């Protein structure tokens, strides 16, 4: 830790003890001290932060709906904040940029909580019979209430994570973001890289999505048709710039684990089921089991997806069990903070100023009443024992959020990764089993557990991000109270934006399985898992316990081998076309890291590769949003068939499916080559 601290202290801005444990009696003094009357919440920081919410909420929503992966928003927002500061007539202060980050980062927080759950409402048809306004309010309230809960429940943990554990927790993401903010003189050049990479991502992915100049997915089903039809084995690879960039950031280790899960599903389970099912149940049952895309012999199988769900659930439980000592310690710290009396200057110091605990309790009580009334009057209205069901749902929501918030915060503080999806699936199953035992079934039951899951998921996403912001603010000298209020207020706009994107894509693309109305829906894989669980427990169907159990066994075996069970299980569930390009992007990132024997030069090149990848992710994601807007305009304004608006429709004899398939692969490989080449151009002075 001390070496890392010395490296980050090269500019002489951060104190020497910023990254080291404090000795008895030693106090950490941030760059901007408590006595400095520096502006923090300014007009420029609020305006720029709100702009970041709109841009990154839309971009991150698209990535999550298509790939089932959240994207990092804090680092790109920090880079843009520093770049904006460099271009402004008055350079922003560090804590102004922290406020931009606190506001803007709510985009990724709300996306992580809302997009992974709320599309399940459309998959299950729970929006039928509701007006667009009712659906909008329903989707908006869940992430907003969850985000506010996440803030309130983490406030008692702030002093413990930032002050008492100073130098004991690495905070990888917080350290990287702090470096960007401190090294302000580099922000301008870094922002330029991010901007041109974003432009490339927008153009290339828009050409593939809207104009269909090439296929956005390369598949061997169009090359080895007979083999695919016979064996049911197919390799596919998405050609999006966004997926390539995601692989660079994820890295080889986790990308390999995710791809290994896909290989087990697509090259073992699917061919095995394809062979066994006709022999055992007949071809008719086999066709019912399979679902996929026309012409490829079935790209996925329902049974394998259920195995993946079982694996994700078991992996979440394993993560919680491993963190049980952390939960106990966190609960002890919460109780200590609630009843601890702060005396002297610590009580009034700007650096130790939180939202008053009485306000926290008041807001938590108001949220509890709002959630109770909403569940009682809307979700379970007309059900026997409606008030009791609503009250029990409220208790489950608060208890799980309180229990898992510490886990999420600890995970992010240690490795910058938190198993939100696994914990949310765990929440759904716990809620489903509990409420089903009390007689709640059908659509009201499905809606109830999805809303509980949505609130919990957003709250955990908030706690993971907020603990990092607290630490950044502690290093630089921000007021905790300002960070807390910025997250609460930012969550309102982020929830509005994300809800709008979810409803737009539901109308334009649809979610989940292809239908006559939506031939190429967004996969929304995480929401698909949530919908499957809700439908199995509350929809009157037989719960596929055997398949869930098989997935759980796979997760346990993988965990015993020392491999990330959550990453492997996610790979089993997600389509292979989304995981294979992630692995390729990770390999490109690894090659960049190994491109020089000089550690400093290799790091400079790797940093630039991450910047380019971040631009590809944001650009590709925004291309998806623009494509959605284009299709909506073509359909609603010009009354055209949006699915017939492409090169293959204009020039069918030239842009054939076979040519578009291979052209997509060529463009993707060219993009990967460009990323490697451009990253290698980085110099130490960059």
Image (tube, rainbow, N blue to C red):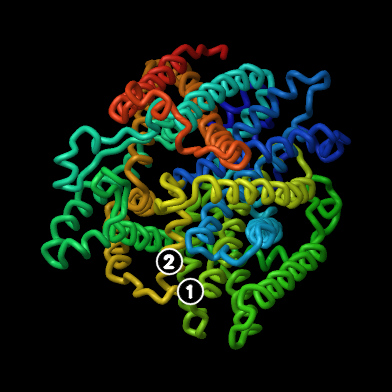
Q: Position of residue 401 (x, y in %)?
A: 59, 64
Left or right, residue 102 beside residue 266: right
Residue 533 marker: 2
The residue lying at 43 percent from left, 66 percent from top is 533
Residue 323 visible in the snapshot: no
**Which residue is found at the position 61% from the left and 48% from the top?**
109
Q: Quadrant of residue 367?
A: bottom right
Query: Looking at the image, which residue is at 35% across and 29% down?
Result: 587
- Using the image, determine if residue 650 lies above or below residue 398: above
Specify the farthest residue to the front: 639
Q: Give the secondary structure at mark 1.
A: helix
Label 1: few (<14), some (14–19) or many (≥20) C-alpha neighbours in 10 Å = many
Q: Tell me if label 1 and label 2 are in contact, CB under 8 Å.
A: yes
Q: Give the residue furthest to the left.
A: 279
Say above or below: 460 vs 182. below
Query: What distance separates the C-alpha of mark 1 from that of mark 2?
Result: 9 Å
Which residue occupies the foreground of this view, 313 or 604?
A: 313
Front one among 459 and 560: 459
């Amino acid at each position: 830790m001390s070496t890392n601290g010395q490296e980050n202290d090269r500019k002489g801005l951060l104190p020497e003890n910023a990254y080291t444990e404090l000795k008895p009696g030693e106090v950490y003094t941030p760059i901007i001290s408590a006595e400095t009357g520096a502006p923090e919440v300014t007009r420029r920081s609020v305006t720029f932060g709100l702009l970041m919410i709109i841009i990154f909420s839309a971009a991150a929503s698209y990535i999550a709906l298509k790939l089932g992966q959240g994207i990092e928003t804090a680092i790109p927002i920090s880079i843009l904040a520093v770049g904006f500061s460099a271009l402004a007539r008055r350079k922003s202060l560090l804590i102004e940029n922290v406020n931009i980050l606190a506001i803007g980062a709510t985009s990724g927080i709300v996306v992580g909580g809302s997009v992974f759950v709320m599309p399940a409402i459309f998959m299950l048809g729970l929006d039928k019979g509701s007006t667009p306004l009712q659906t909008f309010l329903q989707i908006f309230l869940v992430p907003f209430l969850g985000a506010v809960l996440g803030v309130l429940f983490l406030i008692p943990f702030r002093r413990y994570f930032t002050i008492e554990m100073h130098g004991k927790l690495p905070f990888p993401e917080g350290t990287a973001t702090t470096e960007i903010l401190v090294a302000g003189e580099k922000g301008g050049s870094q922002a330029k890289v991010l901007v041109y990479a974003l432009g490339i991502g927008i153009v290339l992915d828009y050409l593939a999505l809207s104009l269909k100049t090439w296929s956005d997915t390369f598949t061997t089903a169009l090359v080895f048709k007979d083999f695919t039809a016979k064996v049911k084995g197919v390799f596919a690879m998405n050609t999006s710039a966004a997926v390539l960039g995601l692989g660079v950031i994820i890295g080889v280790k986790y990308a390999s684990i995710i791809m290994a899960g896909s290989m087990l599903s697509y090259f073992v389970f699917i061919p095995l089921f394809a062979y066994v099912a006709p022999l055992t149940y007949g071809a008719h049952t086999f066709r019912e089991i399979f679902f996929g895309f026309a012409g490829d012999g079935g790209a996925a199988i329902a049974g394998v997806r259920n195995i993946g769900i079982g694996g994700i659930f078991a992996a979440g439980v394993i993560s919680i069990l491993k963190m049980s000592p952390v939960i106990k310690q966190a609960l002890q710290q919460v109780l200590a903070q609630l009843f601890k009396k702060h005396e002297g200057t610590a009580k009034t110091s700007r650096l130790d100023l939180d939202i008053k605990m009485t306000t926290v309790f008041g807001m938590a009580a108001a949220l509890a009443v709002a959630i109770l009334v909403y569940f009682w009057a809307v979700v379970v209205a007309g059900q026997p024992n409606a008030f009791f069901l609503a009250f029990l749902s409220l208790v489950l929501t608060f208890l799980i959020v309180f229990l898992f918030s510490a886990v999420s915060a600890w995970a992010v503080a240690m490795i910058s990764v938190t198993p939100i999806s696994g914990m949310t699936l765990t929440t759904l199953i716990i809620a489903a089993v509990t409420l089903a035992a009390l007689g709640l079934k059908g659509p009201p039951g499905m809606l109830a557990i999805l809303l509980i899951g949505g609130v919990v998921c957003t709250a955990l996403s908030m706690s993971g991000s907020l603990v990092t912001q607290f630490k950044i603010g502690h290093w630089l000298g921000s007021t905790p109270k300002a960070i807390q209020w910025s997250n609460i207020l930012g969550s309102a706009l982020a929830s509005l934006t994300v809800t709008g994107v979810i409803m737009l894509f539901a109308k334009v693309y649809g979610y989940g399985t292809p239908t006559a109305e939506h031939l190429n829906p967004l996969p929304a894989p995480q929401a698909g898992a949530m919908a499957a669980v809700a439908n199995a427990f509350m929809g009157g169907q037989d719960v596929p316990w055997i398949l869930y159990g098989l997935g759980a066994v796979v997760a346990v075996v993988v965990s015993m081998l020392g491999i990330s069970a959550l990453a492997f299980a996610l790979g089993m569930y997600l389509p292979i076309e989304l995981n294979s390009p992630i692995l390729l992007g990770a390999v490109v990132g690894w090659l960049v890291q190994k491109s020089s024997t000089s550690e400093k030069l290799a790091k400079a090149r790797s940093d630039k590769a991450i910047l380019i990848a971040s631009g590809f992710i944001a650009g590709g994601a925004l291309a998806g949003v623009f494509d959605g807007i284009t299709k909506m305009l073509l359909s609603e304004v010009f009354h055209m068939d949006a699915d017939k608006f492409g090169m293959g429709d204009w020039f069918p004899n030239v842009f054939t499916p076979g040519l578009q398939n291979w052209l997509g692969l060529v463009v993707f490989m060219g993009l990967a080559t460009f990323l490697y080449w451009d990253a290698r151009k980085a110099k130490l002075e960059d």
